[in-house]
Amino acid sequence: MRLSLPLPPVVVLCLLPLSAQDTRPPLPFPGLLKQSEREAGNPPATYAAMLELDAQYQASPVFAAIYPEVRLNYEEFLGVPDAGLRAMSLPALRSTPSAGEQAIPDGYAPVEAVTAIARAAAGTRLVIFGEEHHLPQTRCLYEALLRRLWDLGYRWLAAEAFTPDVMEEGFRVPDYHAGYYTMDPVFASAVRTARVLGYRLVAYDTSERGPPGDGSFRDRTQAENLKRLVFDVDPGAKLLVIAGRGHAAEVPPADGWTPMASLLKEITGMDPFKLFAPTMSERSTREEEDPLYRYATAHELVKVPVVFVEGDSRWLGSGNCDAYVFWPRVKVVDGRPNWMGSVMGRKRTAIPAALKRGEELRLVQAFFDGEPGSAVPVDQVLLRAGEPVPALMLPPGVFWLRTLDAQAMVAGPVEVTVE
């Protein structure tokens, strides 16, 4: 499992070394470009600035390694369907599993993931879901899972991605202050669902670095924060934690790093049900995929997100997690991934002609009626000159739509109702 490497909303500015002849201003961290415009509700301002400075970032000794990942993050947030797959092929994230296929062990059968998770959640008070930050598909279960867990008495939702803003009394809808990965509309929609249901939201990550040589400081602080903010307040609490990647692992690796999940189990005495989402998912090439995933998809065992179960209590996972979530291969239809319809129940919605005008890079956004333009939208897609126009994917409801460019709104608002 890989350690999560979050890209927090506040990053110390790094200065690009300048030669005596170089009069260009220093490059900031790419995610801080046009920050005020983005936080006011105009994310294409940040993305357009990245594109304008692309060559400088690619050549920067400070940012060349991290810039492609940040840019692809923004493309994921802006609805580019293959951005996550391209990110997972970057050198820092690319996996090199063994060749061929590995059969699913005898006796294990696929069970629809939310059903399987709910069954396990009924026997504990702590569920930890390790997502893949670069694959919005690994978030497509959140809304359905939150509803099922609510029926089981779960009332707390904690996410590594959250900032303390989500715990403020006046917090209503996810905006660009709520967290970095919550800029993904799929994640933001889960936050909306949690708020409507009545979950108490908890930000538990830390920006402190800890003493030199203490590689577990962040995870230890995360676990302590969860205990203090949830279980010390409500000793009988039932909690869903959305963590990044290996922070959801229970067994410390050989290098001495101790993941949050293992520490939380130790200090609370609770045995969490731990899920790991990144491994069993599609990659840009078959060579990058896990042999179990190659086998399961080749044998049509993964038609919906599933967990493999033997009997009532044996799950197909690893030594670090109780169960892997297996994700279907993705088909892109009208510029959008099919899981937005098949798993999330969204409807393909054509962009009104009035919002298509223009030639520059533009972003079409959809908001629930009554929500401000400073919120993270329910869905959004990029429009580029000369490329097919993608569809919006929306749940039932009344929405207002607009088109933005890097400067400001260029078209809208237009009201749309989805039955």
Image: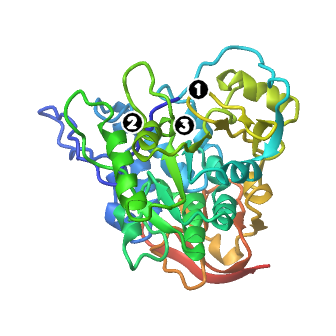
Q: Nearer the viewer, residue 239 or 34?
A: 239
Q: Is residue 215 above or below residue 383?
A: above
Can you tell which of label 1 and label 2 is closer to the viewer? 1
Left or right: 64 as drawn, with respect to 415: left
Disc 3 marks a residue whose amino acid type is Ala
**Who comes first in sequence, dot 3 or dot 2?**
2
Left or right: 309 as drawn, with respect to 14: right
Disc 2 marks a residue whose amino acid type is Ile
Q: Nearer the viewer, residue 17 or 330?
A: 330
- Circle 2 residue: 66
Left or right: 417 as drawn, with respect to 68: right
- Circle 1 residue: 319
Q: Is residue 280 above or below residue 356?
A: above
- Circle 3 residue: 87
Q: Quadrant of the C terminus?
A: bottom right
Can you tell which of label 1 and label 3 is closer to the viewer? 1
Q: Residue at x 34, y 31 (%)?
A: 59
**Element under label 2?**
loop
